[in-house]
Image (cartoon, coloured by chain):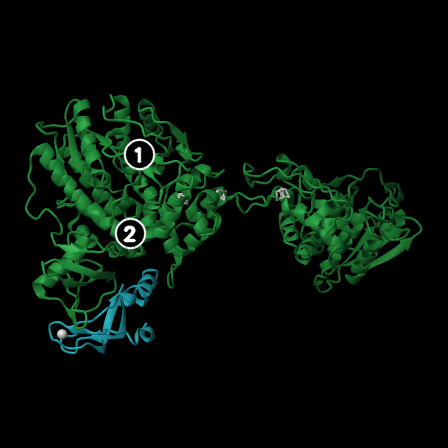
Chain colours: A green, B cyan
Amino acid sequence: MEQQTLRQFEARCIQDEPPVCQTQCPLHVDARNLARLIAGGKISEARRLLDRTMPLAGLAGYLCEGPCRGHCRRREVDEPIDMPLLERFCIARSRFAKPMPLPPTGKKAAIFGSGLSSLAAAWELGRKGHSVHVFHVGPPGRSLIDVPAEKLPETALKETLGQLAAVRTTFEAAENFSPEQLDSAKKKFMAVYLGFDDPALKAVDFNMSEPIPVEPATLAALTGRIFASREPSFIGQLAAGRRAAGSIDRLMQGVSPATAREAEATYPTKLYTNLAKVTVKPQKPPADPLAPTPEEAMEEAGRCIQCECLECVKNCAYLRHYKGHPKKYAREIYNNLSVVHGLRKANNMINSCAECGLCKEICPLEADSGQFIAKARLEMTAASRMPPSAHEFALEDMLYSNSPAVAFFRHQPGADHSAWLFFPGCQLPPSLPGETAAVYEHLRDRLAGGVGFALGCCGAPAKWSGRQKLTQTVRDDLHKIWEEAGRPQVILACASCSLFFQAELAEIPAITLWDVLAETELPATGRAAAEELALHDPCAARHDPKTRQSIRTIARRLEQPIRELPLSGELTRCCGYGGLASAANPEVGDLIAGDRAGDSDLTMLTYCIMCRDRLKGVGKPSLHLLNLLFPNAPMEKAALRKPPGISERQEGRLEFRRDLLFKCWGESPAPGWLMNSFPMHISEELASRLERRRILTSDLAAVLRHAKEHGAQFFNRETGRYLTSLRPRQVTFWVEYSLDDDGAYTIHDAYCHRMVVPGVPGCGAGSPASLEGYAAKGGRA
Amino acid sequence: MKAELRGIKAEGWLCRNCREPLQPMPVNITYMGSSFQVELPRCPTCGYTFIPPDLAYGKMLEVEKLLEDK
Ligand code: SF4
Ligand code: SF4
Ligand code: SF4
Ligand SMILES: [Zn+2]
């Protein structure tokens, strides 16, 4: 991956931007973190944070006026976080954590005045190893002595002066200030700072006019070696002291004081924070605002929203599962792609995204994780770095759907051309065979010019897996069928097919089944369910407003009450099938489906059969719109129908093909049409184990057929069972079975592995159902 | 993966063809261009190798995943 691609993507995600309280704090104190630490009772950690970012925190923490409050996001809900209260609490209850002063630099600066800005400047310079000489009139820090003791404890100033002495600050009391003093300081010191917040210091003392003009970014006045400020607020004085110190330090290091000052001013943050779910909880005023108790401080700190974005993460189970926001994992993905030697630890993560596009819709900056991940997959397959097991099963299932045993095309019975071509996809026919046949009949009744029929898979799985060549071959095959059919208008029943056609087969005029149905008279059989249904838009329909509208039109005409989900339409969620997420990572696939299932207590209604089956798979009663249009069972029962398993899907396609060919075209099935005519007994428990292990009954049949011809490999004397293995493709299957009296096989266990063990008989790489075999042939036979 | 493979049991299993009880013997198993010599129950006569399910879904799967990510 080009580094630029990463950078561009990263730049979109603003999750790492600082919160507004920090960007609008003149000192950029990490207030969000401060609140988090105090809420968690971590006072000394909070103190360390303050000591890092606040000059002379032991003093400053009592004095800051809290300008962040004017920007705090919480004020949009109720009241801003009382940051000054938290700081005051933290300082009062903790001790100064002495930083390691840097070794002396031998460079010297003079400061006139001992107001807060002067003390802050002295501290910042002293910490860096510079020697600072403070000229003052009256006791040092006199202006702070006037602050009432309840607000600023008397010890605070004393301790501060001690800290300053520890970093080589010397104080020199004078009767008054004079121009001669300044002249001699200019000669003796590398730079001079004039802190006019000390009322003892006046411009006239130096024969200067008031106010002294300064350059805002550096506070440079007059010649480059004099810096000055006059800030009315304490926080302004602290920031000015730090800023002047920054200029003087640069000067001492031989760089221009103007270098790299951009980040110092306050600025608006780019961070986005959604406040919709923040509940109102105004501040509980402490009994004594100047001495909050730990409970009061913790409660106030706990009100902090901890502003962040994570909009995508909150709405995507996949991102939540991998515990990262895009900025973090984009880098992991980038690094993963760059690994030359070593483990590619992010492979599984890359393959678990549903590429559903929700994150892009939700992200304030439209960061498109799905697209980024699709790119990563393309690169992985191009570099032969895609783990073969991730998508192989799904892809071989796709190839099977497109194999001559399953796929076919016919013109409408009795016709020799097709104005239309109904393409229901590979999953609808095995899941709702009767309804698929019924809607085909309905289309023939309603549409003129002949409605042809084609069974097969569109190729979406190939695209999701990042296999460009395979995608191309599958799409070319489909194009040929379309040509053969006489370039008809294609009617698609599956949202994923629709999306795939738009992207890969744009030359084919395609329309969704739902658009056709909405524009024609509905089947007389159509009826509403007895209850209100929650409408789930498939993620593939996210950018298909027309179809979404058609669905709502059909529901209205059926008088089916519909509840719209909060995340619907363009913001709809995925069922986990998209992007082959559930194929590569069943656990994450189920988390994604679970999120959606949890969005409503009502039975779901959808119009993508994979959505329907996957939602039901995680326990959600769900209906497909065809269940309403062609009901053949009570609706409550249809909503609870168990989705077909992997073997049932493959067999279901064969059965559907046989039934439709017979019913519409009077064709009888060719002998041996069923893939496994082996009589087998499989317990329900084993069946679900096989489902998880992705072992098909046709795999079992292949192993048994081989054993029947060549004899089993192992026999168990104690149990009387046989065990035998076969490697029909990149997987070795083992079946433990016994022979029943009636000639049937009882299967006790079956398992598989990918490693090659010598001696296991195989069918060779040319097996028609294998990916290798398909690639070698370059498409359909 | 050698150490973990010791003690793989093939209790009661015979090579059906040779009628021989299985014995731990070295065998080379391979995946994604890597090869491992391990000791597994095999028929001493014809050499058929026995793989039990807990091996297939235990150590073997772990190594397969590792090699796929390499
Ligand atoms: S709610 Fe917390 S994090 Fe957000 S702006 Fe206010 S103090 Fe900062
Ligand atoms: S699953 Fe969907 S929402 Fe989540 S990261 Fe992937 S594309 Fe974005
Ligand atoms: S929605 Fe996600 S990707 Fe977009 S800015 Fe927020 S955290 Fe980053
Ligand atoms: Zn043998």
Local SS, label 1:
loop
Instruction: Estimate the x, y position of residue B51 in percent, counting from the top left.
Output: 23, 68
Residue A129 figure quarter: bottom right
Residue type, numbered disc 1: Tyr
Residue A518 figure quarter: top left
Residue type, numbered disc 2: His
Query: Separation of disc 2 and disc 1 at Cα?
Result: 25 Å
Q: Which residue is mark 2?
A: A391
Dot 2 alpha-carbon crowd within 10 angstroms: few under 14, some 14 to 19, many 20 or more: many
Q: Which residue is mark 1?
A: A607
Q: Is residue A356 above or below residue A110?
A: above
Q: Is residue A477 above or below residue A738?
A: above
Residue A510 figure quarter: top left
Q: Nearer the viewer, residue A68 or A264?
A: A68
Q: Nearer the viewer, residue A69 or B33?
A: A69
Instruction: Estimate the x, y position of residue A193 in percent, counting from the top left.
Output: 79, 49
